[in-house]
Image: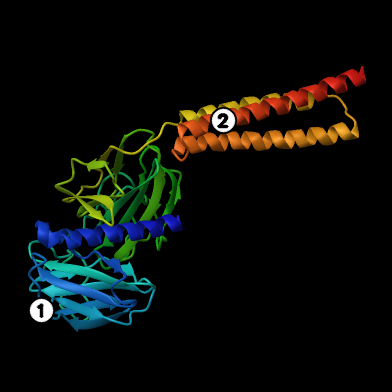
């Protein structure tokens, strides 16, 4: 899962970077990218670049204070004429979050671990709901109206029931990232669980949900410590501390066809729906919950990004994927079946043979070893054909040659068995 998570971070960063790059030119709503950290190789390692804008990427906010919460400390810097505040010398691995107060709006980024090999870019967008509601104010600042925690619901939530737990939700920085790899979908849930209160919360029973049908190899990723996964059942362990708790996991799905629906219900409200399909190619992604969807390209790789409003606890999120690449498994199944038949015949011959002389036993062992190599070669040829890495003519010729060699090996094994039986008689 570590490799998969690393690929996810790189792929998601590329998709978001491309989307931000085209935001002003294509009239996209920049608020959809507000607060999302993007590792960037063109920013010096240990540096966080925070750009502050109002409404669109063309309206920079200059001379304004931005705070960077680094671990337990806080640093401040003012934006330049381009609306950027730079924070240098940030230690790798430390948890970082950017905050700015613009009028009565509190703007806050997702919390992230500082990478070692690259700097980080992010944009904070003021105006029309770009504030991060329910988050705690930075040290030394007065709480804003937008930052006031919502009224707590005294009714505790039953895990997986769809009721809202007191003061808990999935923050607007949460997202789902889907990658296409061969004929497998790799799905990542990258969520921030927000406790807007001032004390730990322990829902009873604990928050839990079930992953979609067909999900396999599910496991927590990155800095997730409060998640337990058994099969397809995901549990968020108590207590849930105030602030933001990462809930990040990944699983694989094998659609087996050109279309697939990822259907999921979550136990908490999700404040802002965001889904990215990376490496989309000709694939399409739609959902009844999307209010906007766009397709882009970065480095020759196509991605699709969909977003929507709040998703209520217990409401089904249905993400439809069409035009998925898939290959028939008929060739592989035929090869495996043929291999099993030949193995069974060989095993029968081996166990039914009588005692043989020392020289005969040595030759028989050589033939058995050659038989196993030929069978393995036959399966590899069928796999190569299924993967499209060998032409049909080459596949046919190679398969015919392997089968002919196998026939000779089995013929000699049978002849040895006959000679052994005659000698014993």
Report whether 45 appears left or right of 230. left
Counting from the top left corner in percent of width and height, residue 226 is at: 40, 59
**Mark with earlier residue (2, 1):** 1
Say what secondary structure mark 1 lies in.
loop
Q: In this view, does 84 lie to the left or right of 223?
A: left
User: Which residue: 25% across, 77% down?
Assistant: 68
Crowd around label 2: few <14 · some 14–19 · many ≥20 (10 Å) = some
Closest to the observer, 114 or 151: 114
- The number of discs equals 2
Quadrant of the rendering where the C terminus is positioned: top right
The residue tagged with tag 2: helix, strand or loop? helix
Q: In this view, does 383 lie above or below 105?
A: above
Q: Distance between the residues labelled 2 and 1?
A: 70 Å
Q: Quadrant of residue 221?
A: bottom left
Q: Name the residue under label 2.
A: 399
Between 201 and 254, the residue placed more toward the observer is 254
Disc 2, disc 1: CB below 8 Å? no
Residue 62, label in figure: 1
Please indicate whether residue 131 sits to the left or right of residue 181 in the image: left
């Amino acid at each position: 899962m570590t490799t998969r998570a690393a690929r996810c971070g790189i792929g998601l960063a590329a998709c978001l970077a491309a989307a931000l790059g085209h935001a002003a030119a294509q009239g996209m709503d920049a608020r959809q990218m507000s607060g999302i950290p993007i590792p960037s190789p063109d920013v010096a390692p240990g540096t966080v670049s925070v750009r502050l804008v109002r409404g669109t990427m063309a309206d920079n906010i200059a001379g304004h204070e931005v705070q960077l919460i680094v671990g337990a400390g806080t640093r401040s810097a003012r934006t330049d004429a381009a609306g950027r505040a730079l924070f240098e010398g940030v230690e790798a691995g430390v948890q970082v979050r950017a905050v700015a107060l613009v009028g009565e709006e509190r703007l806050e980024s997702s919390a992230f671990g500082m990478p070692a090999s690259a700097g980080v870019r992010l944009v904070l967008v003021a105006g029309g709901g770009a504030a991060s509601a329910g988050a705690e104010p930075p040290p030394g600042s007065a709480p804003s109206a937008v930052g006031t925690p919502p009224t707590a619901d005294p009714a505790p939530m039953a895990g997986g029931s769809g009721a809202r737990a007191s003061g808990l939700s999935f923050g607007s920085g949460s997202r789902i990232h889907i990658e296409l790899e061969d004929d497998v979908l790799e799905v990542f849930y990258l969520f921030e669980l927000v406790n807007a209160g001032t004390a730990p919360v322990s829902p009873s029973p604990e928050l839990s949900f079930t992953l979609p049908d067909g999900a396999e190899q599910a496991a927590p990723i990155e800095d997730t410590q409060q998640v337990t996964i058994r099969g397809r059942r995901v549990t968020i362990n108590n207590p849930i501390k105030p602030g933001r708790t990462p809930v990040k996991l990944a699983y694989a799905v094998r659609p087996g066809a050109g279309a697939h629906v990822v259907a999921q219900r979550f136990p908490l409200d999700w404040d802002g729906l965001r889904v990215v399909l990376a490496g989309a190619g000709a694939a399409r992604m739609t959902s009844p919950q999307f209010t906007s969807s766009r397709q882009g390209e970065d480095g020759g790789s196509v991605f699709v990004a969909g977003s929507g409003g709040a998703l209520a606890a217990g409401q089904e999120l249905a993400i439809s994927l069409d035009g998925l690449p898939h290959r028939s498994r008929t060739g592989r199944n035929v090869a495996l079946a043929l291999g099993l038949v030949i193995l069974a015949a060989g095993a029968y011959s081996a166990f039914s043979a009588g005692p043989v002389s020392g020289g005969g036993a040595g030759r028989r062992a050589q033939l058995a070893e050659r038989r196993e190599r030929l069978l393995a070669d036959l399966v590899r040829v069928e796999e190569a054909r299924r993967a499209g890495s060998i032409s049909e003519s080459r596949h046919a010729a190679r398969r015919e040659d392997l089968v002919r060699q196998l026939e000779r090996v089995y013929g000699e094994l049978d002849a040895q068995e006959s000679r052994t039986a005659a000698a014993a008689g």
